[in-house]
Amino acid sequence: MRQARYEIVEDDGSFYGDIPAIPGVWANAKTLEACREELESVLEGWVLVSIADHSAIPDIDGNRLEIRNVA
């Protein structure tokens, strides 16, 4: 979430947020706090789907999330 960026949408004054390192993870809400909460929820969902699909999760700030099968 530290790499999240936010901006105000001029058309309606809402807030838009995304995480550039993770394409497709974005949120839009009426307040900055609501946008942050929604973005966090979207990120959590994205991670869960990536794990379920065995999709690659990009490194962020030098951190890597790896899922290993333990036998």
Image: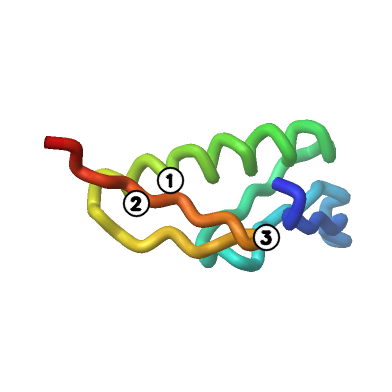
Q: Are marks 2 and 1 in contact (CB under 8 Å)?
A: yes
Left or right: where 3 falls relative to 7: left
Residue 47 marker: 1
Q: How is the image coloured?
A: rainbow
Q: Residues within 10 Å of mark 1 (few under 14, many from 20)?
A: some
What residue sits right under mark 2 in the picture?
A: 50
Secondary structure of the residue carrying numbered label 1? helix
Left or right: where 32 falls relative to 43: right
Q: Amino acid at mark 3?
A: Asp
Q: Residues within 10 Å of mark 3 (few under 14, many from 20)?
A: few
Task: Give the quadrant of residue 34.
Answer: top right
Left or right: where 49 falls relative to 18: left
Real-space CA distance between mark 3 and mark 1, rounded to the nearest whole angstrom: 16 Å
Q: Amino acid at mark 2?
A: Ser
Secondary structure of the residue carrying numbered label 3? loop
Mark earlier in primary sequence (3, 2) = 2
